[in-house]
Image: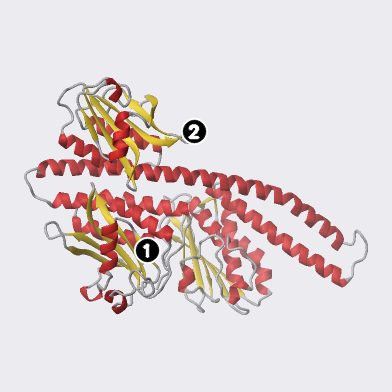
Amino acid sequence: MKEKVKVNEQARLAALYEVSSRLGASLDLAEVLNQVMDAIIQLTGAERGFLMLIEKGSGELQTMAARNMDQKTIDGRSMQISRTVVERAIATKEGILTNNAQEDDRFAGQQSVVGYQLRSIMCAPLRARGEMLGAVYVDNRLFTSVFDNADLSLLVTFANQAAVAIDNARLFTQTDQSLSRRVEELSLFQRIDQELNKSLDLNHILNLALNWAISHTDAGGGSIGLMQTDDETEKRYLRLLVHRGAATEQEERDDEEILVPISHPVLEQVLAGEQSIFTRPVAPEQAIDGTPAVSQLAVPIKRDGMTTGLITLESHLPYAINDEEIAFVERLADRAAVAIKNARLYEEIQFVSKAKSEFISVVTHELRLPMTAIKGYNDLLLGGMTGPLTDQQKQFLQVIRRNVNRMQDLVSDLSDINHIESGRMKFEYEPFDIRETVNEVCDNMKEVIMSKRQSLTIEALSVSADVYADPKRIGQVLTNLVSNAYKYTPEGGQITVRVQERANFAEIAVIDDGIGISEENQAKLFTQFFRAEDQAVREQTGWGLGLSIVKKMVEAQGGEIDFESELNHGSTFIFTIPLANIKEATSIPT
């Protein structure tokens, strides 16, 4: 079974943003359900997953989608799940995680858990517009402790977004008297979802949501704001962005920003009831943003069941903002809440990433100075500048030199990763003959490769055009791959570097007949600081950063990298570089 790749928070957010942005692309219910399950399995690394919806009228749970990790539908014979877990998630309206259902007091006694030998399970309810739609359920029947709390949080977050897409698709399939109105509105929300999910900029999202609310109702103006807490007084308040007058859908203006105390009578009502408040007529003290109005609608923006913000609309017309428009703004607020949450998480991740980048910059700079001094004085001692040395003293100094060199490599690798991730790495692009770089790297590696009696072969098929990249960085990439092939290929082995053209790219492959990579480790191969536990790997020096740097450098220069490997049968690493002039390039037979 493929193991899930554990990822950091920034990668989790990126994955969540990627799969979420695809949800609004279809209104076909079956397609949406399969999309949701495939996305959930991708996010959590589960073995299989099920999506169950509550049938209107009977209230019974119906399995609407059942998928496995290969994105295939599960047949009826394999649909053994714990309905107790599902029903509990729906009843409590909370996500459930158990890492060994066989020993979990909540479920161990259930016939389904025992009979189906269920182990690692997660389940999250599906809710939209205040209605319970059903639940999503994922499990791994073979292993325990597959999921953690971060996985459950990710599942619950995505389930909230998926519920909106499922709700849209279900509503779209209904045929009733207001079908044309609903189709128009759902199409509009599809567009709104796509617009909101295009950006992770918080102010842009707030402006978009408010502009949609004003332009699709009879409101004459409005405001949108988020709840905040004063760091000194610890008092909560609402920070409002106010639009005076109507706005177009895409308009962003430098409007007034005001602070509303939590004691405001309408804000108090919204927070107490967690629901929309429609006021007509509006007394001066009831105006959220101080704008005189006849009608006022205050709609909460809720996240995880709590009010985190407010959309307010006003009108001078006595019968403006009807029930349909109120429902529209409430659904808009649900969508805005998801986008706002993603934007806030992104801001937090960016802040942490910047702090990490600055920390690494300081550390690498501060480490270089003492390492240079240590290496310099060590070389003076080894060179006999302070007098003759015993054999044991020379041996100790050689150990110091080797470890300083390792530390310099680590500092260099950390610096490279930091520069790439922060966008500060400079690439000196120019057209050059990739074969010359391959020959140079192989010449530099020849002596060390011959020391293990290995064979190094270059197969440079007739590449007819230069590539366009940074020759120094491409040489660094190739050196790393050839070095890995040398390290993990036994004495007497064969290493081949092959160069050929593929469409508009030069393709460079480094092939060895070494120890290969297990299927378990392949999924983690490009993860920073990952090193396999195999003894043959641990015998080689390294920090587990090389392949991560290689991948980032190749992709930063417009190429791609991939590999094929089988345990004990060698590995092939292939990366591409764009051709400098694709018009002059000709196809090369494979």
Q: Residue furthest left?
A: 177
Task: Give left or right: position of 275 versus 506.
Answer: left
Image: 580 above or below 316: below
Image: 180 above or below 294: below
Question: Mark 1 vs mark 2: which is more N-terminal?
Answer: 1
Q: Quadrant of the C terminus?
A: bottom left
Image coordinates for residue 412, horizontal then vertical, percent: 64, 54
**248 or 324, which is in the foreground?**
324
Residue name at image x 24 percent, y 21 percent = 293
Q: Find residue 97 and name its label.
A: 1
Residue placed under numbered mark 2 in the picture: 233
Q: Quadrant of residue 242?
A: top left
Visible residue check, residue 569: yes
Q: What element carries label 1?
A: strand
Mark 2 Cα-neighbour bin, 10 Å: few <14, some 14–19, many ≥20: few
Give the residue type at disc 1.
Leu
Residue name at image x 21 percent, y 21 percent = 316
Q: Find residue 457 and name its label.
A: none
Q: Distance between the residues labelled 1 and 2?
A: 37 Å
Task: Give left or right: position of 51 versus 455.
Answer: left
Image coordinates for residue 523, horizontal then vertical, percent: 46, 66
Q: What element carries label 2?
A: loop
User: Which of the two marks, 1 or 2, is nearer to us in this view?
Assistant: 2
**481 or 56, which is in the foreground?**
56
Q: Which residue lies furthest to the right in this view?
A: 387
Q: In which quarter of the image is residue 393?
A: bottom right
Task: Give left or right: position of 31 versus 369.
Answer: left
